[in-house]
Image: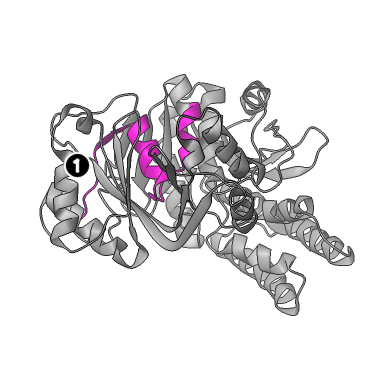
Amino acid sequence: MIVMKFGGTSVGDAARIRGVAAIVRSRLARRPMVVVSAMAGVTDALLAAFARTGSGRRAGAELATRHAAVARRLGVPAAAVADELRELAEALEAARERRSASARDRDGVLSFGERLSARRVAACLRAEGIEAGAVRADEAGLLTDDRFGEAEPLAVALPCLRRSLARVRGVPVLTGFIGRTRDGSITTLGRGGSDFTAALAGAATGAEEIEIWTDVDGVMSADPRVVPEAHTIERLSYAEAAELAYFGAKVLHPKTMLPALRKGIPMRVLNTHRPSHPGTRVARSADRAHEVVKAIACKKGITLVNIVSSRMLLAHGYLARLFQVFADHRIPVDVVSTSEVSVSLTVDRTAGLREAVRELRRFAQVEVRHGRALVCAVGEGMIHSAGVAARLFAALGGEGINVEMVSQGASKLNVSLLVRGDDADRAVRALHARFFGGG
């Protein structure tokens, strides 16, 4: 069995859904299971509709019209999506009637993007003569905690999914992104949730491979919008792929790696527009012989926090106290660099940061710099190669780009450099040219 996950652009209209059906047909001998995202733009439209403004109501009506039109162009019965559209209208009306709709209500409304997508793709497969059935992941046993908007699966989710999916006749078309609490409330898995669903489904069923179908030729050596000469990376290790995903590569989400890694299931990132392209293979180990650095990634919208205190010197428990402040305010920390009396760290979320800084200033001097970017060189080959850092600094120095912070993790497969946001694209181009040529 293989798992095939199709993103929002891949199921964005009737023509693309037919393309998905053709790709699935080509994989029938490998017993495919399909996981789908909402159509491109639908999640934003659902958020607008949930806002309960006049424009939101129009968004809800336009959404229903769009889905009905796609179903009609596919030649599938209107009934394939009619009941979901009716339930969506009821959910939006119920949310409007409440004085303040909750995150629970929001997740319930957002779930309709994937629910409609699964119904429509399954109906298209059947119209093409392929036995298929839409499966809601929340009803198939993807049980989660109750952190609405960013739910995490419970340990029982995998065996529950395994039993449910084994009962589906033909090709299961599973909703990505959504789960359910033990008390029956729908949850969403956050950004990259459909990729995460695909990895969980693959782990649950012991799939031989997980395919992530998107609109690019696999994982690229840099963002091709910034570096036009960027190339497809043939092979990545799970660790390299996770680093790239965390630091800005949009075609994979870091959470996706863990279920696949635990089960040793290889992944492949492929292009729905060019299905014959081999894409990128992600597995436990990758070829390190040719390239020291596999890719240059960039994460924008970063905030630098510099914390200075003489109390750090020879003190125990100080760092624990410092990081507890960020934990208390639910602020994830990206990159950390320390000295005897200072800590520099970066965050990509500013919600709660003002309060955290106020608390930190009770025992330290704190400086905050917004509008930064993390530019990262990623590759397991760096572990065995000398002079990589010198090449990084030389490339940026040659462009007159100042590095405000540098960090290398214990794994030594990622070097992160903090630069001003305005310099980010130029930094990526300079580093790519230094390690891969061109530019």
Q: Which residue is mark 1?
A: 389
Which color scheme does this rendered protein use?
Answer: one colour
Residue 4 is at least partly visible in this image: no
370 over 328 or under it: above or below:
below
**Residue at 74% across / 56% down in the picture?**
106
Residue 219, image x and y in percent? 31, 45
**Residue at 81% across / 38% down in the picture?**
184
Q: Within 10 angstroms of label 1, few (less than 14), some, or many (20 or more) residues?
A: some
Q: Is residue 386 magenta?
A: no
What stretch of residues is rendered in magenta? Answer: 230-259
Residue 327, image x and y in percent? 62, 40
The amino acid on which the numbered mark 1 sits, given as a three-letter code, is Ala
Foreground residue, 292 or 124?
292
Residue 289, image x and y in percent? 14, 29
Q: Is residue 243 magenta?
A: yes
Horizontal side of residue 194 vs 58, given as left or right: left
Which of the 4 quarters of the picture holds residue 407?
top left
| The C terminus sits in image quarter | bottom left
Name, please, the residue furthest toward the left.
Answer: 437
**Residue at 56% across / 40% down in the picture?**
322
Foreground residue, 178 or 380?
380
Which of the 4 quarters of the picture holds residue 377?
top left
Name, please, the residue furthest toward the bottom.
Answer: 54
124 over 25 or under it: above or below:
below
122 over 60 or under it: above or below:
above
Foreground residue, 295 or 274?
295
416 over 381 or under it: above or below:
below
Horizontal side of residue 314 vs 176, given as left or right: left
Residue 273, image x and y in percent? 34, 55
Label 1 element class: helix
Residue 39 is at least partly visible in this image: yes
